[in-house]
Image (spheres, rainbow, N blue to C red):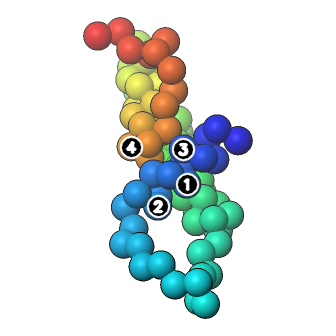
């Protein structure tokens, strides 16, 4: 549920908000679902890149972490070697 909340908060933070109670039609599941699908496609493309050697796999993992962070989702500190 934490990932869901991070994604939703990030998506909504980029939206212009107009509060009207009579036409409130935001569907949080649809917003998060669309974003998750796009994220999975980008991760799949990173992992599918067979042109990388084994040492470059570290770069693949870092690219995946960067994709999560670009959506406002933290991945912890294990990947932060800098």
- Circle 3 sits in a helix, a strand or a loop, which is it? helix
User: Which image quarter holds the N terminus?
Assistant: top right
Circle 2 residues within 10 Å: few <14, some 14–19, many ≥20: few
- Which of pointers 2 and 3 lies earlier in the amino acid sequence? 3
Circle 4 residues within 10 Å: few <14, some 14–19, many ≥20: few
Which residue in the protein does label 2 denote? 12
Q: Is residue 70 left or right of residue 43?
A: left
> Residue 16, how many percent across, how many down?
36, 72
Toward the viewer: 18 or 45? 18
Q: Is residue 5 above or below residue 64?
A: below
- Circle 4 sits in a helix, a strand or a loop, which is it? helix
| Residue appearing at x 49%, y 31% in the figure | 74
> Is label 2 or label 4 in front?
2
In whole angstroms, how far apart are the C-alphas of marks 2 and 3? Answer: 10 Å
Which residue in the protein does label 3 denote? 6
- Which of pointers 2 and 4 lies earlier in the amino acid sequence? 2
Q: Which mark is residue 8?
A: 1
Toward the viewer: 41 or 6? 6
Which residue in the protein does label 4 denote? 70
- Circle 1 sits in a helix, a strand or a loop, which is it? helix
- Circle 2 sits in a helix, a strand or a loop, which is it? helix
């Amino acid at each position: 549920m934490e990932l869901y909340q991070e994604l939703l908060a990030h998506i909504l933070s980029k939206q212009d908000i107009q509060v009207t109670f009579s036409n409130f039609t935001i569907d949080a599941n649809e917003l998060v679902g669309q974003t998750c699908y796009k994220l999975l496609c980008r991760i799949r493309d990173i992992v599918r890149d067979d042109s990388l050697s084994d040492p470059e796999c570290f770069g693949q993992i870092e690219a995946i972490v960067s994709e999560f962070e670009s959506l406002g989702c933290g991945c912890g500190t294990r990947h932060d070697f800098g």
